Image (cartoon, rainbow, N blue to C red):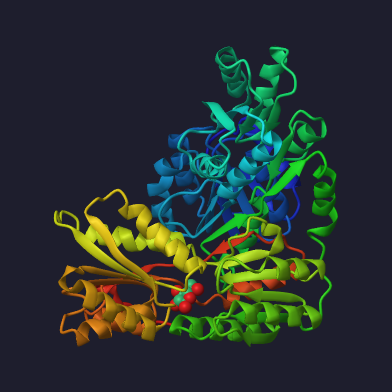
Amino acid sequence: MGFRIKKSYWILILGIVILGGCVYKVAHGSNQPDEGTEFVIGVSQANLTEPWRVAMNDEIRKEADRHKGLQVIFTDAAHSNDKQKQDIDKLLGFGIDLLIISTNDSENLKPIIAQVHKKIPVIVLGRAIGGYDYTLFIGPANETIGRNAGQLVADLAGDQQVNLVEIQGLAESPPVLERSKGFKEILQNHPNIHQVDTIVADWNRDKAEDQMLETIKNHPQIDIVFAHSDAMALGARRAFEKKGIQGVKIIGVDGLEGENGGLDLVRRDILTGTFAYRTGGKESIQYAMDLLQGKSGIPKKILLRVNKITKDSVDQYVHNKQNILHAPKQHKHPIELGFVQVGTESSWRAANSSSIKKAAQDFGIELKFKNANQSMENQIKAIRSFIRERVDVIAFSPVVQTGYEDVLREAKMAGIPVILTDRELGLKDDSLWLTSIGSDFQEEGRRAARWLLEQTKGVKKEINIVELQGTSGSSPAVYRKKGFEELLKNNSNYHIIASKSADFTKEAGRRVMKEYLKKYGDKIQVVYAHNDDMALGAIEAIEESGKNPGKDILIISVDATREALNALSAGKLNLTVECNPLLGPELMKAITDYVEGKEIPVKIITEEGIFSQENAKRDYLNRAY
Ligand code: GYE
């Protein structure tokens, strides 16, 4: 090799040797994995100046230490996109089996991540990247942080007229966009709260201090500050102190432990409140090992639970974190799961029920299964019976988004965790359920619209759409509609001329489509059905009217069942957006993780794709449902 190793490297290598089970390396020297190494994971960090990222790497090290034969190699991009790309190349040069990356700039690094994803699994940590070219995203529920911060500001303001300043991190970065979106969603209902300024401080404390000093010059009367990180919130406090201004309520985000961490700042009344969530470092190694060991039930995204921290709750939060949250749970043997299904309204639902029954068997979990025939009342009755039977865990798919608050409070009082599968609730208090496993319905609606816009690109004339909605008030119907309209609203020649519920059933889909054909006839160019069953019903109605479905009228749906792929191959359907019903393995994994004392993310989002006439034939045969 004939090269001399500088003194500092020797100290480093010595340091490496001393560190026990898992071997960490900083990307230097030889690129041969150490003796007895089974897996090598590369961790590409955006920088190590943000306290939150230092905490994330510490968590990764701690969790990795529990896995013998695991080697972890860290790199630090020091706020540079080019350096981060070089780091990735270097890590690939080390022959890593999996990449964990927390991006400096998500958009800029998206292409190289897509490249790496073609070769090895990629876990994106903290800052989301658009698109689907990665294996798993782990990050905080940022919109929830924004909404909860908005609610805390509203609670602090009461009905007083108050002046507010928002301090944002890196402009246009996903956490900033999502936190601001959630924040504004709440503030718009409180006209007494006036946002007098918005500061962009790039997650940097000193920058926040300097800019707040400028803002104070223009706005001497500031009552509340919401900063997207505790470090920037501390910067703001320092600015007010410099100006001798007391009594401004300052809210941060991150809630890290340690001196000047958010928990400490709240305890010392420097901050009025903060929002604590895990960095995801620990989860990234747990899921990385599951991936490397080929385990099933790996989702596409997990969103980490957010905890509001104020002076009154900080000690309880730390106590729970240290003693309760990670303690293995008492349970029957085998574990007893009470599951309440929506009904039997569609072939998607049938696939979902069999996936849950099969996974319970595979995981050795005792399943009590009840079918509610699309009735919320039946579901509430069934949940109450499971509470009386003191099952270990209750899981259900809520028919609609509202009406379950009381029974969920009863389950919480009884100490029985509840898991939402497939459909979500419209309740703000997410402490009423352990986690929610399912799809991103709004993204499904966006995918349907994205395809339609692409398909009809350049068409100048009016495009009339009729919509077959799912069960009214159900989360898939509400959000598939919202996502679809979100992308169409900026295109003025697209019109939804009729929209009605057909309750996710084929029969109702056929009936409502017949009504539409009678009323609008040739005016209809597109059908957007919230599920395949309704679309297949509509296809029958269109054929009975003498028209060619898929040709005279474009048909877009959701689920991607085998029947739909058949209709695609026959040219009668044009697109179906996948909604994965095979939630059994993820549900059982969440339950076993929970009883083992692992912390469960607040939202687990499944992997999904889209099917068009082009790929339907290819994928039809090995379609699981
Ligand atoms: O799309 C439909 C079923 O809740 C996501 O319900 C599920 C929906 C699915 O009836 O086929």
- Relative vertical location of residue 417 with respect to residue 504 in this rendering, above or below: above
- Measuring 70% from the left and 62% from the top, which residue is drawn there? 432
* Residue visible at 59% across and 55% down in the picture: 303
Q: In this view, does 121 lie above or below 372?
A: above
Percent of width and height locating residue 132 = 42, 58
Q: Which of 561 and 286 is in front in this view?
A: 561
Image coords of residue 236 (percent x, y): 65, 23
Residue 252 figure quarter: top right
Residue 39: image x %, image y %?
A: 59, 60
- Residue 153 at x, y percent in the picture: 65, 37
Whether residue 625 is visible to the viewer of this picture, yes or no, is no
Q: Relative to residue 63, is residue 526 drawn left or right?
A: left
Q: Which residue is rendered at x = 20% and y = 85% of the image? A: 543
Tell me if residue 392 can be seen: yes
Question: Which of 39 and 11 lies nearest the eye of the viewer?
Answer: 39
Left or right: where does residue 526 sit relative to residue 552?
right
Left-right relation of 1 to 381: left
351 sits to left or right of 234:
left
Q: Which residue is drawn at 64% across and 59% down?
A: 602
